[in-house]
Amino acid sequence: MGKIKAICISEEKGVQKHEVSSARLIEDFGIENDAHAGKWHRQVSLLSYEKIEEFRKEGAEVKFGDFGENIVVEGYDLQKLPVGTRFVCNDVVLELTQIGKECHTHCQIYHKMGRCIMPTEGVFTKVLKGGQIHVGDEILMQYPLEDRPFQMAVITLSDKGALGLRQDTSGPLIKSRMEELGYEVQEALLLPDDEFMLEKNLKRLADQRQLDLILTTGGTGFSPRDITPEATRKVADKDAPGIAEAIRAYSMQFTKRAMLSRGVAVIRKKTLIINLPGSQKAVAECLDCIQDQLPHALGLLRGTVNNCGR
């Protein structure tokens, strides 16, 4: 059982958060009167009290709220908890959605101390159930349910699509199809064929959001701007070649040009990343090929199913 040591809000973005003795949390929105609340996955930020105290012992003169955190929690090493962990306080239920964040502009704390703990130690949650919380309230941590739906992202790679010169039809098809199968699509991105940008987002979705599955569409051919396989390999911890081989073999039934696809499948930590072709027709065929085996593969990565032979 943990304890709330501080609650902090800011009424305007870009303004330092200040302490309040209590707060009302609104379902699927965040803390009432906090400028960072909204319809997104980073509604309420949490930071460990113990990590703040360790940082103070290094000489940092910091107050609660200086890191931009909403709730300071004693008793948990938050950054070691998996996404999907829930926190219960009175009637309030929060669900962990992201570990850490990218620091775009270094804050005053970073310039003074040479580092800041929020990008690595801070976590973000969404409000599943609203209610009132107070400083001093106990907060209970619950590990994620083993049978929770698989969470995923869809990334479309298209220079023209990113410029608004071509409508993306493959990405929405994947999203619709996977949601019908029970997957929770957390993000759907439309990016240019930019290797650095794709690599950066794959790392973020696998490391910070800890998604089970990422499906990309586009950028797998022979054109000079087709860089999806290269960016995907750069983030890989392990290869999963059988998936890409099965996709090409299945697609060869419909067109011999399937042999020209360079798509790969890899694993980063506990996230499976699969490259799909760019055309709507080819995407539908590829999903037909792999959809039956995905739950077992993702269950193995989660550790909720056992590997077994035929």
Image: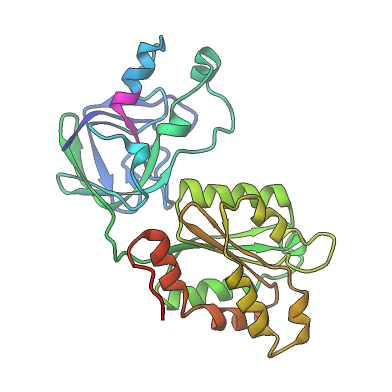
* Residue found at the very far top of the displayed protein: 59
Name the residue at 38% across, 45% down: 43
* Residue found at the very far bottom of the displayed protein: 253
In this figure, what is the number of numbered marks? 0
Left or right relative to 280: residue 305: left
* Residue found at the very far front of the displayed protein: 309
Question: Magenta includes 304?
Answer: no
Name the residue at 46% across, 26% down: 15
Q: Confirm whether residue 12 shows in the render.
A: no
Image coords of residue 17 (percent x, y): 38, 26
- 182 is higher (above) or lower (below) than 141: below
Image coords of residue 306 (percent x, y): 34, 67
Q: Which residues are magenta?
A: 45-51
* Quarter that holds the N terminus: top left
* Quarter that holds the C terminus: bottom left
Q: Nearer the viewer, residue 6 or 232?
A: 232
Image coords of residue 266 (percent x, y): 58, 60
Name the residue at 51% across, 75% down: 176
Name the residue at 39% across, 69% down: 307
Q: Confirm whether residue 101 shows in the render.
A: yes
Question: Magenta includes 49?
Answer: yes
The color scheme shown is rainbow
Left or right relative to 164: residue 61: left
Image coords of residue 260 (percent x, y): 78, 75
